[in-house]
Image (cartoon, rainbow, N blue to C red):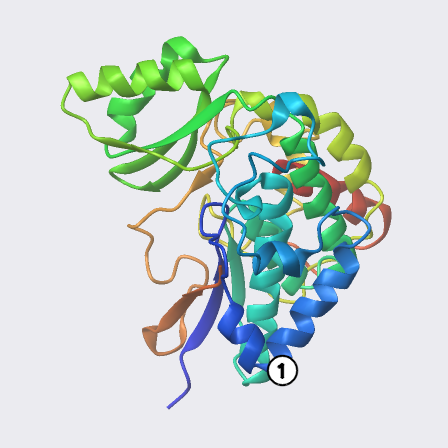
Amino acid sequence: TKRPEVVFLFTGQGAQYPGMARRLYETQPVFRAALEKCDALLRPYLERPLLSVLFSNQSSVVSDQSSLPTDHRSLLTAHWLHQTAYTQPALFAVEYALAELWRSWGVEPAAVLGHSVGEYVAACVAGMFSLEDGLKLIANRGRLMQALPANGAMSAVFAGEARVRPAIAAYRDSVDLAAINGPENLVISGEAGAVAEIVERLASEGIKSKSLNVSHAFHSPLMEPMLDAFEKIAAEVNYAAPRIPVLSNLTAAPLDFESEIGKLSVCSRRATVSSSRSARIRFCSAWPANAWRDKPRNGRRRFGCLPCARAAMTGSRCCRVWRRFICRM
């Protein structure tokens, strides 16, 4: 009997918590080595060392935010780990170290899949760019997003697209449908006042929602101002075709960069997926078991959540396509 295939699923922002992975760091040499390597590589990009942020006992950033511009400090998140300039590289490092740990135990992914920050880890694990370049991308992504005004909000809405899209239609320039986690589990993101109005309107219709603990309105129009600067950074990275399939979180199929990503403009905020305002992330609970491969072995496939390109793609075209893809995440 063949062993079931394993797919690594890398989570996005919001999964972090102070002290996460401390026990693994203390007890697992492979995990510790990978995390310490990330810590060293991130030193040029972070004012505070990664390990001190991860394992700090600090309870508040209110009195010590010297590394952030006054207008962009979020007092709603009570630990440095919840400031996106640190959240994003911290999640990347922990997820990468987890993947290294699983691999050291002989568990190799048949494919990888990611959500937001997790897409970068998935791409790195698949060999699309080096760990050094992956950390460079995610650290600068977090820094640029942190520098944006902290006037956004995100909220999970427990209703389907048919109910939510009409509710946000009047706020097209300030609120977007950021993620579709399931048929009745969506996330809206955008300007805080507009999100509050939408949530209030939905509540009057009996639709429940839950505010997310974030410093900014990710995957929304409010991210537009950082895209040009991020594109320049992405252009400095060396890209390669993946060594293992990278699954799309829109379709569950292996990404085909030649036919799909190549059609995108520089960044997702300016791209057309199915419409210019389509959800950035879609996790469909109704995906068929064979969504990413026609004949799964024994019909079994396992997804392990860790907080199509072909080898023929080489040279400058590969770099251009990947630059577009990275900015889209």
Residue 282 rendering spot, x and y as whole percentages: 41, 41
Quick one: 132 or 245, which is closer to the camera?
132
The x, y position of residue 195, in whole percent, is 38, 19
Query: Where's residue 6, x and y in %?
Result: 45, 73
Farthest residue to the bottom: give it: 1
Q: Which residue is mark 1?
A: 29
Q: Is residue 206 visible?
A: yes
41 and 120: which one is in front? 41
Compared with 87, 264 (above or below) is above
Q: Residue furthest left?
A: 206
Task: Tell which residue pokes out farthest to the front in this image.
Answer: 63
Residue 264 in sight here? no
Instruction: Out of 94 and 271, give the one closest to the viewer.
Output: 94
In the rendered structure, the answer to whether residue 174 lies left or right of residue 315 reads left
Q: How many marks?
A: 1
Q: Regarding mark 1 in the picture, which secondary structure is present there?
A: helix
Quadrant of the frame with the C terminus: top right
The quadrant where residue 293 appears = bottom left
> What amino acid type should be assigned to the residue bearing mark 1?
Pro
Residue 283: percent from the left, percent from the top?
38, 46
Q: Residues within 10 Å of mark 1 (few under 14, many from 20)?
A: few
Quarter assignment of residue 227: top right
Placement of the N terminus among the 4 image quadrants = bottom left
Residue 326 in the image: above or below residue 91 = above
Residue at x 50% of width, y 46% of height:
13
Q: Residue at 73% x, 46% y: name it.
A: 137
Quarter-of-image position of residue 147: top right
